[in-house]
Amino acid sequence: MTHRYIEVAIGALPQRFHYHLPAELTTELLQLGARLVVPFGNRVQIGFFVRYVDQPDIVKTKAILAILDSPSLIPSKLAKLIEWVANYYCSHIGIVLAHAFPKNNLHKIRRRLSLTNEGTAALHAGKIKSETAETIVTALLKGEVLFETLRAKIGTKNMTTALPSLRKKGWVKQRWDFESPPEKRKNEVKETLDVFRKDTAILLNINQQEAFDEIAAALKKGVFSPFLLHGVTGSGKTEIYLQSVQTVLAGGKGAIILVPEIGLTPQLFNRFFSRFGKEVAILHSGLSASERYEQWRRIKENEAHIVIGARSALFAPMETVGIIIVDEEHDHSYKQEETIRFHAKDAALVYAKLHHATIVLGSATPSLESFHNGKTGRLRVLSLPTRVNERPMPTIQTIDLRIREQWVLPFITKPLVAAIEKRLERKEQTILFMNRRGHTPALLCGDCGQKWQCANCSVSLTFHKQEKKLLCHYCGFQQSAPSVCPKCQAARLIYMGAGTEQVEEGIQTLFPSARVLRMDRDTTARKGTHAKMISTMEQRDADILIGTQMVAKGHDFPMVTLVGIICADLSFGLPDFRASERTVQLLSQVMGRAGRGDTEGEVFIQTFQPEHETFRYLSNYNAFCQAEQGFREEAGYPPFTRLILLILSHTEEQMVAQKANQLASILKQSCHRLGVTVLGPASAHFARIRKEYRYQILLKGKDHVRLKSALKKGLLDFNKTDLKGVRVIVDVDPQSVI
Ligand code: ADP
Ligand code: ZN
């Protein structure tokens, strides 16, 4: 008998598993993502159908036990996106599928036993000899019974001896199904509903109207229409998103709105919720498994047609997508750096094309890629050059940190203190930005020069004063803070630099009665704390907000009239081709938080390099892009070339160096004649992370298809060699190459 073989993905395992369909299940036509019950080891598991195969990898395939979804719960266009992501980013389809579904362990697999007519007849005819078999059959007389219930009654041993033969004789049959998690009675969305005040569309200004008209026209046409909405901070981009989504909903389609970070979802959610109410769902990895399932279900069952979330919201089970909005499109958080290394913005563009939808990439500081695509016409550029209601952009003042006489406390200068004082008097708010958490980023013995490095990584440990600990920001390694040098016993320890904790300490010393909030990874680790800080700011129950890049993004606090950048230099000088782009974007974003209300804003930039060219571009982003483009073209970097980064890692440096050399020479062969350049191997910028040494190889080429085929061929040959436990990560279109 010939079987119908299938490939199944199990959990998020990166292997493929082959099974066959038993005769009674061959009639169904399976689609990608259909959930199946499969035997796996000595357990049963839920797996995803991937594809039909002609020739299985193994000789003796097992039969699947049941099909749970037919048709698959994955809409067909989403299935195509999932395939694209797996293929383009060299990931495994099972991992991408697992990403698209709420966690499976919410569904209980049930195995149910029942008596066949033959079984009943056999019992009445006295054909059942063994006592155990008779107990089983009698228990099933009244109808279907759960396997577990029966097992509890008669014991595992009796069950395993008697049941197989009863099934073989055709007297007992079994079926599989699963129980969905109970619908949550309370959830975020419905709770907010109680305080629901509906707001209505704002009358757009001329610039907004022009931009909106173009989007509306594209929506009407129903063809793939990609836009870049380049609007300065506070220019009213969100209002355009809201009105575009309104148009999409009226046309009976759905909308996906992506934000770069979970932290930004509540704010945007509130704005959408007050306009669209229950139509809005929220999806991101910060939700608990059951919350996530509930949101997913509401989208799947057409209760919600708008989904807001971070990267994973793209995989929402929406049937017809009319618009995708990618807010703060330049943000590098759109690139996922673990499990699947995919770029949500690029995937969104592909997905919009599949849906013949409109896509709006919005930003005050577009990525160089989008700027370039705007120039070449691949994106249609919509500009909002001014803030709403003729509000001016904030004024900028640079403060030279080299003049020590200006320092009141470390990194806090006289002009900044005076400016904060003024805000406190006027009951306005201040944001202070310091792109480093902890108290002090480096510790040094003043006598012998001993430095404190992480035991697992080649990075120095950061001093966290409140916790009295030295912490590694890469792997979490920690040790208690020393009071004397362990090497020379000297008590003269030098603390170098500052982090948010030290800034907070200084500000609180200078302004003891000010209400100060600190927002960084340490203070927002607990669920809900980040959202709480935002609402405290909104309600003006805080005077000064100090934080890392978390304070830079997206927030709209109208009472913030002062932004202080404590040390702008922190972002300079990383050996990455995107370093200056990031710096300009980040500083522009922070500055954009000032003066969004009726009072004009002021920005103070403290720096050791006031002459640094970055500052020239802060009020002219287009000039920056123009200059940066020239540099990228000359140096052969994106958007003028495509890159693939390979990262090899192993606990022994020699091993990883050796394999990296081998892979590089194999790749040089496969890249030969394809116009692909192989750079490296070289030790990574952070040479050791989490006990593993890391080496990198960079592939560079003009044509993505050639780049990919060179890579595939090279990896195929490399995987035939003894890998000696060296891990290889493939990063397609890397955001960072250090
Ligand atoms: P962006 O997203 O571009 O930073 P927002 O959409 O947050 O800007 O708008 C900034 C503020 O201006 C918001 O409080 C918003 O409600 C308000 N706003 C937007 N459009 C208008 C308009 N046409 N007239 C008046 N206020 C507006
Ligand atoms: Zn570490």
Image: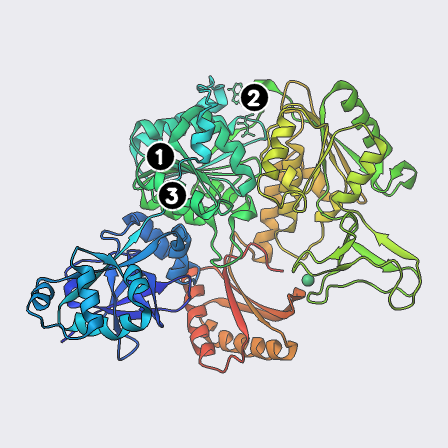
- Disc 1 packing (10 Å; few <14; some 14–19; many ≥20): many
Question: Ligand 1 shows up in which quadrant of the image?
Answer: top right
Q: Residue at x 43, y 64 (%)?
A: 708
> In the displayed structure, would residue 642 be above or below residue 220?
below
Q: Residue at x 52, y 58 (%)?
A: 338
Disc 2: which residue: 388
Q: Secondary structure at mark 2?
A: helix
Q: Is mark 2 within 8 Å of ligand 1?
A: yes
Badge 1 or badge 3: first in the primary sequence = 3
Q: Where on the picture, by quarter, is residue 673?
A: bottom left
Q: Secondary structure at mark 3?
A: helix
Q: Is residue 180 visible?
A: yes
> In the displayed structure, would residue 658 be above or below residue 430?
below
> In the displayed structure, would residue 621 be above or below residue 65?
above
Q: Residue at x 35, y 32 (%)?
A: 218
Label 2 near label 1: C-beta < 8 Å?
no
Query: In the image, what residue type sits under mark 2?
Result: Val
Disc 1: which residue: 305
Disc 3: which residue: 296
Q: Nearer the viewer, mark 1 or mark 2?
A: 1
Name the image quarter holding the C terminus: bottom right
Query: In the image, what residue type sits under mark 1?
Result: His
